[in-house]
Image: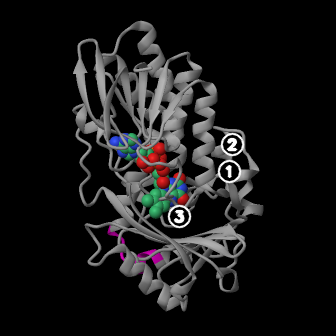
Amino acid sequence: MSEYDVVVVGAGPGGSTAAKSCAEEGLNVLIVEKRQEIGAPVRCAEGVSKSELASLVEIKKRWIAAEVAGAKVYSPDNTVITLSAEQAGNEVGYILERKIFDRWLAKQAAKAGADILVKTAAIGIEKDGEALKIKLRRAGEFFDVTAKIVIGADGVESRVGKWMGIDTTLKLNEIESCVQYLMTGLDEKYDMDYCHFWLGHSRCPGGYIWLFPKGNGSANFGIGVMPSMAKETAKYYLDRFLEAEGIGMSKVVEVVAGGVPVSPMEKISTERCLLVGDAARHADPITGGGIINAMRGGKIAGKVAAEAVRKNDFSARFLSRYDKLCKEDFGKTLERNKILQKKILKMKDETLNNLAKSLEGYRMEDMSVTGIVKELIKRNPKIFWDLKSLFL
Ligand SMILES: Cc1cc2nc3c(=O)[nH]c(=O)nc-3n(C[C@H](O)[C@H](O)[C@H](O)COP(=O)(O)OP(=O)(O)OC[C@H]3O[C@@H](n4cnc5c(N)ncnc54)[C@H](O)[C@@H]3O)c2cc1C
């Protein structure tokens, strides 16, 4: 088949969820994925909130690598704040096996009726009368399919937006540059029932270091730094940290590098086009987490695409309801967290130490960013006076 209602570019969590949502609405939908294998290589630390994931899909044991009991956050002087499951209810997380999870999501889309082509890259889009001509390349062969709407779920390096006239260029202060090692034998040094986060501009400028356990003593150990603030590469800062922790590089079994967009975009749709997930910059500016919002946006995109097909209206004006629905669902939180991120980026390590000390001994009831910030505001009203109305 070469004529579709919708072509989805990219089979990450955003693309597969969007395709499933389109297919469930009765649309003919094709997903194209440039990699030969969906879900690999993984460019993710794979952490998600249990409750948020459960609100989107039925949880399957086979794609959960580990379940954590809480989180330990280390300030620059290593003051530790422990957020425990007992206190945190259902807010603590799963560490996924994304190689399995992404593939499972794609299969769900196929089950609902979506066609899938792997090793097939979208290389351009042309307006072709009353439709779009999506230009594809598969194993050296070039061919086209037509679609009424394209959903760009092509991740942080998205081209779909640009082809359709949306400026998706990321500035150096709008992205976190990340590198991550999958390491083994870490249970001798770290409590693997917890995720660990290290903060501090001197050790990770404009970002943080993470350890997310994956079971059997292995974990994703990674770093994100903001290129506009870092003098060296992300790898430099991670290696320096691991050396200081006394961890040998012989324990590394996989290396991944990638970027996370951490600055929401004003416009995520235009005539015949919707952007989803990292392509729409829907990752959280504070945590860098983007899996859940990619899936939420994908679900909404499928519904809006179906309405457009039913009404035969593919105008920018009609499709802008997608922007509005995303904003109502999670976009306001992204904007608010962007304001918080800008404030934190200006704080000195000394201030971060004092903030951590202000939370020492506190029984954290809510492990979300909002919960932590609410408590920080209550304990440090002078520092956070400008955020009071946004969080309390
Ligand atoms: C190091 C690192 C750690 C992270 N850790 C976390 C975490 O712990 N938790 C979390 O929630 N988020 C995390 N993220 C962010 C998370 O990975 C993304 O937000 C999430 O994958 C976004 O999903 P997506 O579907 O929008 O895009 P992606 O998962 O990036 O999928 C995009 C897909 O599009 C395909 N594609 C691109 N261009 C084309 C083309 N032209 N034609 C066809 N296919 C194309 C790509 O091959 C890819 O498969 C992390 C990111 C990085 C880099």
Give the amino acid at mark 3.
Leu
**Is residue 287 left or right of 236 when viewed as pictured?**
right
Give the amino acid at mark 2.
Ala
Label 2 within 8 A of ligand 1 by Cβ: no
Residue 132 x %, y %: 29, 21
Residue 52 x %, y %: 63, 45
Residue visible at 35% across and 16% down in the picture: 318
**Is residue 91 left or right of 12 when viewed as pictured?**
right
Single out the mark in the foreground, 3 or 1: 1
Nearest the camera: 64 or 138? Answer: 138
Instruction: Check whether the beta carbons of the residues at disc 1 and disc 2 lie within 8 A of each other.
Output: yes
Instruction: Look at the image and give the residue range highlighted in magenta.
Output: 346-352
**Is residue 228 left or right of 249 when viewed as pictured?**
left
Please name the residue that numbered disc 1 is placed on: 50
Give the amino acid at mark 1.
Lys
Indicate which disc, 3 or 1, sits on the residue closer to the N terminus.
1
Indicate which disc, 3 or 2, sits on the residue closer to the N terminus.
2
